[in-house]
Amino acid sequence: METNTNKVVVTVVGKDKKGIIAAVSTALTERDVNILDISQTILQDFFTMIMIVDMNDAAVSFTELREQLGLLGQKHGVVISCQHEEIFQYMHRI
């Protein structure tokens, strides 16, 4: 298995309100994390978003990003989590 990837899966879940996508996108941009793919939906009043991001040029470590996005999520009333792509793939294998 290839282990030199720096792709991370970022998930955001919570009550829908204005500015969630902008806040997360801005936080990633400020840390030089590139958004490769994004999917978001609103089910009734609940917002869900999954992003695949590339940390090759990131200005922070994975641990720092996870902690900082967690705090951002608390500020906006959502839960933001980060997982390395490989872990996410292993966890969600059928």
Image (cartoon, helix red, strand yellow):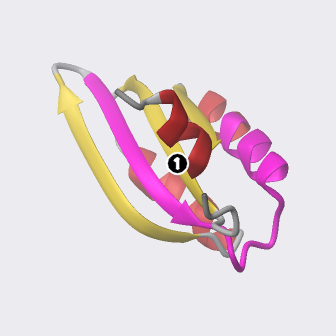
Q: What residue is at 53 percent from the left and 62 percent from the top?
A: 53
Of 38 and 42, which appears nearest the observer?
A: 38
Q: Is residue 17 visible?
A: no
Number of other residues with Cα within 10 Å of mark 1, as a class: few under 14, some 14 to 19, many 20 or more: many
Of 63 and 47, which appears nearest the observer?
A: 63
Q: Residue 64 magenta-drawn?
A: yes
Report which quarter residue 75 is drawn in.
top right
* In this view, 28 is above or below 40: below
Q: Residue 93 magenta-drawn?
A: no
Outermost bottom residue: 57
Q: What residue is at 56 percent from the left and 50 percent from the top?
A: 85
* Residue 21 position in % (x across, y down): 40, 52
Q: Which residues are magenta?
A: 46-70
* In this view, 65 is above or below 49: below
- Horizontal side of 19 relative to 31 (left or right) equals left
Q: Amino acid at mark 1?
A: Val
- The quarter of the rendered structure image containing the C terminus is top left
Report which quarter residue 73 is drawn in.
top right
* In this view, 7 is above or below 66: below
* Residue 34 position in % (x across, y down): 54, 73
Q: Is residue 71 visible?
A: yes
Q: What residue is at 18 percent from the left and 24 percent from the top?
A: 43
* Residue 60 position in % (x across, y down): 82, 64
Which residue in the protein does label 1 denote?
9
Q: What residue is at 63 percent from the left and 67 percent from the top?
A: 5
Give the secondary structure at mark 1.
strand
